[in-house]
Image: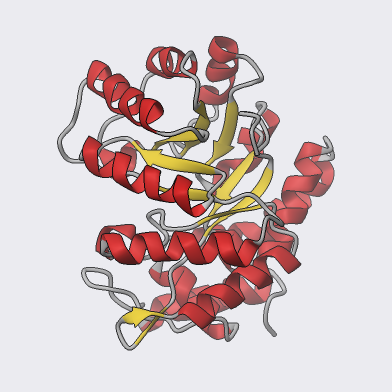
Amino acid sequence: MTARTSFRGSFTALVTPFGNGALDEKAFRNLVDWQIAEGTDGLVPVGTTGESPTLSHEEHNQIVEWCVEQAKGRVPVIAGAGSNSTAEAIGLARNAEKAGADAVLVVTPYYNKPTQEGLYQHFKAINDAVGIPIFIYNIPARSVIDMSVDTMKRLFELGNIAGVKDATANVVRVSQQRAAMGEGFNQLSGEDATALGFMAHGGHGCISVTSNVAPRLCAEFQDACMNGDYRTALRLQDKLMPLHTALFIETNPAPAKYALSVLGKCADTVRLPMVRLAEKTKAAVREAMVRAGLIN
């Protein structure tokens, strides 16, 4: 996977299954196989949905290794490698590259609130440390800071910066980023509910939470968008929208893990400070799954 623009379609931001407090290797590997069998175009382990904040570095690297091994080159793997410490992010990115990941996903540094120049230098340092594509993960709602289009343009001039996972939920950004960087800048939505508009504005795919639970529907939705069949895409959006909403009633990934437990794919265990869902939320998630045709 050498081209910087090879990443297209439905990518799943994988949950990290736990059993008795430890990583559940069997459930994780089975999840990878199921995702690929259902038509998912790529996998993104150990992002926020993978509970990366509460994984040890050893666990983080282990999950990436398992994902690459289990995928066996059938789909690309974009490994989460972000941190608000540049040195730590470089370490995670190098481990992902060593494990055979096709790219890394690096979040804008959270909590310490760097300037735009600080953002540039952070990503440049990671760019200079690895030889695989890097996706900028821009998610102001979680990281507080918002990377500007101008900063992205500067970064895209570097050798390994491939594109963005855009979780701003602002579809105008897609057009602004296309105008600044051109079609070669790989734009993946990081927000399920607005992915339809994102794709219509010129996006290339979505790194999805919902595709943990409804991988086939999300893959069909992305296929329709990429084929310009927005009538079909809108029909699938209507079917998926209750699920997009329900999976964020409480903080991700607790609702997605509960939905996967209903499907028998993994336990609904999350690590503190995340907690299992309230009963009212469980009912809403199940109702959304019924409406999407995932359960009766």
Q: Quadrant of residue 215?
A: bottom right
Foreground residue, 239 or 102?
102
- Left or right, 120 with respect to 133, comes to left
- The chosen color scheme is secondary structure
Q: Classify the position of the C terminus by image quarter.
A: bottom right
Q: Quadrant of residue 54?
A: bottom left
- Left or right, 173 with respect to 223, comes to left
Foreground residue, 123 or 245?
123
Q: Classify the position of the N terminus by image quarter.
A: top right
Q: Position of residue 286 (x, y in %)?
A: 55, 79
Q: Position of residue 128 (x, y in %)?
A: 37, 25
- Residue 243 higher or lower than 165, as above or below: below
Residue shown at the point (33%, 59%) measured from the top left: 52
- Residue 245 higher or lower than 20, as above or below: above
Is residue 138 visible in the rendered image? The answer is: yes
- Residue 252 higher or lower than 85, as above or below: below
Foreground residue, 292 or 130?
130
Residue shown at the point (35%, 61%) measured from the top left: 60
Q: Residue furthest front?
A: 98
Q: Position of residue 229 (x, y in %)?
A: 84, 40
